Amino acid sequence: MDANTIKQLIISVPALILAITIHEVSHGYVANRLGDPTAKLLGRLTLNPIKHIDPVGTIIMPIALYYMSGGQFIFGYAKPVPINPSNFKNPKKGMAISAAAGPITNILLAIASSVLRMIIMLLLSMFPDSGIANAVLIPLTLMLGYSIFINIFLAALNLIPVPPLDGGRVLTGMLPYNMAITYSKIEPYGFIILIALIFTGAAKYFIYPVVSALYLLVPFI
């Protein structure tokens, strides 16, 4: 592993882990506020990434994507936070709100990353040749730039209206009861459908427009 690879991983991996960890914690936090303490009781309302690591999504997938893309792309996901809808006063509505918390949190993280990136770039313009700039500020700028991208991409991906993705659960919560029951039956096949959408290229017709729309919400890019 050469120096450039190590540098790229140092920049991208922390942003990815933070994005997927806070995404999952937000689901559990909102569910807890709505009456379901399942995630809290299982110790999942923590920012400790070890509690949220999924062997495939957090380790194998990011490494595979990194090498398959020649170091240009890295992505992954965390272990889903368990939610028991029977604990909600309104299970259908509670699941939809809990699901929406993940993408909303990623959008807010992208906005926060953009604001911090702007502040650091202003500091760089004031101290362009300082040792702190080269050692700290420039790497932070790169890391925050990746954080903007990964959070927007993660939000867009999860908004695909196919359960068990967040968008699918939000849509289920918005549908009339009988239609919601019928639509939720595709959840066991959701990831197969998602993989098919990705490999056929159909997913891009949803993800790209959503990504473009979300970028409009992020200042200072």
Image (cartoon, rainbow, N blue to C red):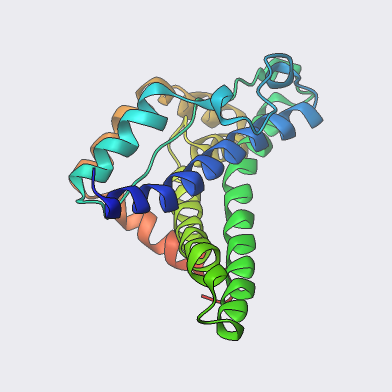
Residue 88 seen: yes
Is residue 79 positioned above or below 64 on the image?
A: above
Residue at horizontal 73%, vertical 14%? 41
Quadrant the N terminus occupies: top left
Looking at the image, which residue sits at the far front?
131
Residue 175 seen: no
Is residue 110 positioned above or below 138 on the image?
A: above
Q: Position of residue 206 (x, y in %)?
A: 37, 54
Q: Position of residue 48 (x, y in %)?
A: 62, 30
Is residue 214 positioned above or below 155 on the image?
A: below
Along the line of sight, the residue nearer the viewer: 11 or 178? 11
Along the line of sight, the residue nearer the viewer: 107 or 93? 107
Residue at horizontal 66%, vertical 17%? 84
Q: Position of residue 2 (x, y in %)?
A: 24, 48
- Residue 44 lies in quadrant: top right
Q: How many numbered discs, if any?
A: 0
Residue at horizontal 80%, vertical 24%? 35
Whether residue 71 sits left or right of residue 34 in the image: it is: left
Along the line of sight, the residue nearer the viewer: 197 or 153? 153
Q: Position of residue 203 (x, y in %)?
A: 31, 49
Residue at horizontal 40%, vertical 25%? 186
Along the line of sight, the residue nearer the viewer: 132 or 159? 132
